[in-house]
Image (cartoon, rainbow, N blue to C red):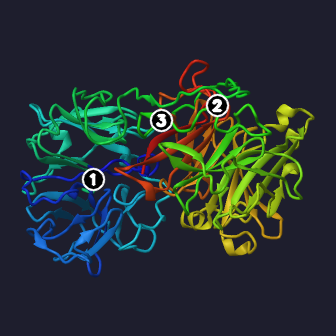
Amino acid sequence: MATACAAALTLSALFTGAVAAQPAAAATPVGYQNVRINEVTSSGNDTVELYNTGPSAVSLSGWKTSDDSFSPQAFTPSSTTIPAGGFVTFNSPKGLGDADKLVLHTSDGTVVDRVDWATDAAKPALARCGGDGTGAWVVTTAATTFGAANAPGCPSSAPASSRIRINEVTSNGSDTVELYNGGTSAVALGSWKYVDGDTAHTPVSLASSSPSATTVPAGGYVTFNSTLGLGDNDSLFLLDASGSSVDSVTWATDGAKPSAERCADGTGWFRTATTATPGGPNSCSGSGGGGGGGQTGQLLGGGGSLTSGCTPEAPSGTGSAPAGTLAWPGGLDVTIADTVCAFTTSTGPEGRDLSGLAFDPGNPSVLWAVKNKNWLYKLVRSNGRWVPDSSWSASGKQIRFAGGTGQPDSEGLTVGGDGHLYVTSERDNTSNTAPKDTIMEFDPSATGATLTPLRQWDMTAQFPQLDTGSKDDANLGFEGVAYVPDSWLTANGWVDPRTGSAYAPARYPLHGSGLFFAGLEWDGTLHVYGLNSDGTYTTFGTVSTGKASVMDVLFDAGTQRIVATCDNTCGETHTLLKVGAGGAIVPDATYTNPAVMPTDNLEGFALAPVSTCVNGGREAVWSDDGSYGFGSGTTSFGHALYSGTFPC
């Protein structure tokens, strides 16, 4: 079954589950549930695109499609096999109308997926936005992309109704369905309908099944009993007032007995539950699917003895999460992901202070990390842990300011469009009472044990409030930085604060292919810069995150959002920001960490690219600046890295 990917957080991903209208025969191909209708147009050649969200190829031999007026007919796909993470296109064997639907069947008649649309909603095309195979269905605002990943030109804001999810369903006795609202505002269900996997059935009004279920409160639940009768191999599709697809779920024999439930609520994969919990949080105690190992989750791994001189540091500055913060949307289990006291250096023998993290978009098997006391690490996976890449440097590489001097108090890093590493520093550790808010550019392919910047941009003069002679004030500067591509800014209608009109990258010929958003710990603002090739920089103003501090910043292509992370200062939270209707970058939603994690100075956060997705999830990694974990005597003490899962 499909899982909620990135858009469950921001663009409210739709989960379309594979469906069986009749008991699946032996001819049903392995992995058919992972094939998704991904894009469709009712103009011209009535083109349809399929996407395989699963880990292995699926044969399309003998598959058929139908709409609201013709019986299943064979089609000719561009390939008879759809590879894992791949696309296949075909032209519908019969014309698709302005207001229509498309149903995908295997050769034995099993319903695989279905999409319904209202008048003109498939013109120029209807496409999944926020994640191929999993995102929300929207009318495309960019050119069609048949045969390739859907364009990032998603609407700047999705309707609140697209946050509604089928959260639990039972085919046992009363055939109860539970809906969950993962958004921040109530949603009226009005004329919404539902239908099962029997293509002979017409959609039924939800109100007729439960007259009292008229509104789903923010973060709340609504239940109703299906009047269609749900069977062993069946499905349920949810349609909004216009008749357009919102969400769906499928299950095999006994998969919805006692129930099939999402783990976690509203975002996780469906799994067979051991206890049905309609009207409340899911028990998440069953089997199958993904998304965590129980409602409280588990912290896995750890252990080992502290090395000589390794002294973890207890967290400080704990505060509250912002109002309206939502629960972590990914898996509930977390794994300790490094060896104990792994980051001791000559300038940091206590083995702590690992801060910024960034996956390499050009090589997702590489995780870059930066240590406050001027060290860079190239990390790779080994035996389930992130360890230094010995072919690059087994003990990290020391970095300097321009000219080869000083010790950057390096806090954050990002990978630019050129593949170079851009590192922020807030002080020179050799003179730590004075701020030195800089962004330094390093070539990761450079040889030698010490790296010096190719270019360096010094913004210290912009922050006089940090230059008080106090090392504490000087330590509240640039904590994180994210490279944000121009293509995202222009596609989403960002208004250039310098001109008051649509951002035009060509107006700034020396800045490269994107802008850099540096997070200021002092007040939680993001400062936007064009880093020019001549060593100058262009300031594009500030962005409010709505939080007191920012410890790391990233741009996530999966959710199509900028993510501002704060540690225990703000309740261990991640705020996703979008381009709002007025063209400004504004907060969209805030999520906390998995509940099993310690409340520490978790200053680094990174999300793996969507190309790494397996079963609807991808890796999330955190760094503990103090390597403290849950304290002395616990298995987490002395560890800096944690690994979990996040929707695609």
Dot 2: within a 10 Å radius of its alpha carbon, few (fewer than 14), some, or many (20 or more) residues? many
Residue 376 relative to residue 82: left or right: right
Residue 454, x across and y down, in percent: 79, 64
Q: What residue would you read off at disc 3?
A: 335
What is the quadrant of residue 147 in the picture? bottom left
What is the quadrant of residue 150 in the picture? bottom left
Residue 548 relative to residue 112: left or right: right
Q: Is residue 176 above or below residue 75?
A: above
Residue 5 got which mark? none
Along the viewing direction, whichever of 68 and 64 lies nearer the viewer: 64
Residue 437, x across and y down, in percent: 82, 48
Along the viewing direction, whichever of 538 and 552 lies nearer the viewer: 552
At horizontal 6% and vertical 51% (from top left) the residue drawn is 23
- Element under disc 3: strand
Q: Earlier in the sequence, mark 1 or mark 3?
A: 1
Q: Is residue 128 above or below residue 335?
A: below
Report the mark closest to the observer, 1 or 2: 2
Three-letter residue code for mark 1: Thr
Dot 1: within a 10 Å radius of its alpha carbon, few (fewer than 14), some, or many (20 or more) residues? many
Residue 16 got which mark? 1
Q: What residue would you read off at disc 2?
A: 627
- For marks 3 and 2, give the CA distance: 14 Å
Query: Label 2 near label 3: C-beta < 8 Å?
Result: no
Dot 3: within a 10 Å radius of its alpha carbon, few (fewer than 14), some, or many (20 or more) residues? many
- Element under disc 2: loop
Q: Is residue 495 above or below residue 549?
A: below
- For marks 1 and 3, give the CA distance: 29 Å
Residue 101 in view (yes/no)? yes
Q: Which residue is at the far bottom?
A: 44
